[in-house]
Amino acid sequence: MNDALSIFLKYVLPFLVAYILNLLINKFLSKKFLRGKLFLIFLKGIIIAVIWLAAALTALSGIPAFSKTWETAVASSGIAAVVLGLAAQSTLANVFAGISLSATHSRAFDIGDRVKIDDHDPGYVEDITLRHTVIKTYQNEIIYIPNSIVGSATIVNYTQEKSFSFPVEISVAYGTDMEKAMNIMADVIYEHPLHHGPRPTVLCKNCGDSGITLRALVETRDFKDNPKSCSDVLVTLMERFAAEGIEIPYNRLVVLHGDK
């Protein structure tokens, strides 16, 4: 009985305590609570890693061959640092890059931001761990990018500003009353219920082979509202142009039959 209790206290209890502490940390520092607190999220990962490491070292110290695990770990910390530095360069690079990404006040993103990292598809920052940054794309795909790559990447943040804008374009035929067409386009965008900001400026982007391309920005408070708003604007523009007799040019194929 005493042997069983001794084994439990030496080898099982450290991991049980670590497990309970892990549960408590995850409960009180939930994703919802930590949203927008990138540094605390990364710090949480470090604390959990240290807890499990301490549990492992405590359990090992109960084995006679490792009875001086703590002393050995401290005494050989210099050698261990060299060995770890050589054997786990990429892992350590990810850890230090994660610290840099989360600790700086001028960090490029926070949890919940929509970003584009280098050539990866744009997505929302879901999490940052000791090893990687987790991005969830608009198609609900999860991308795991090593922190070392994120730290040296070109990052486009779409949500740090108070609004998001995206251009819509539509063509009108040559001979169209341009002032009338541009005013209709500006009105349609400005009157959309999700449009945010002043009345947009409509520009003549291009004079092509078959028509003139008009361009304006649709601005919304949230990125999620923008694709639907742009779609609504284009549909309404086609209806308004048709009602006002403004032609939207398109390529036509004319087939001529010779006399038989």
Image: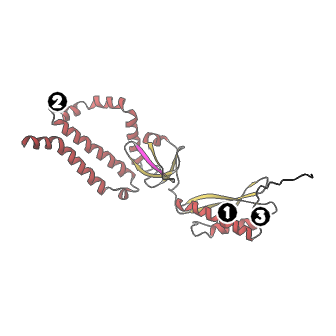
Residue 201's disc is 1
Measured in 3D between alpha carbons, the distance from the residue under mark 1 to the one under mark 3, in whole angstroms, is 21 Å
Depth check: give the residue in front, 91 or 138. 138
- Determine whether 194 is above or below 110 in the image: below
| Left or right side of 44 for 118 | right
- Determine whether 145 is above or below 246 in the image: above
Residue type at tag 3: Glu
Q: Residues within 10 Å of mark 3 (few under 14, many from 20)?
A: some
Hey, which residue is sitting farthest left in the picture?
A: 2
Which residue, given by chain and number where applicable, does mark 3 sit on?
Answer: 247
Q: Position of residue 75 (x, y in %)?
A: 22, 31
Residue type at tag 1: Thr
**Residue at horizontal 54 percent and vertical 62 percent from the top:** 225
For marks 2 and 1, give the one nearer the viewer. 2
Which residue, given by chain and number where applicable, does mark 2 sit on?
Answer: 65
SS for tag 2? helix
For marks 1 and 3, give the one nearer the viewer. 3
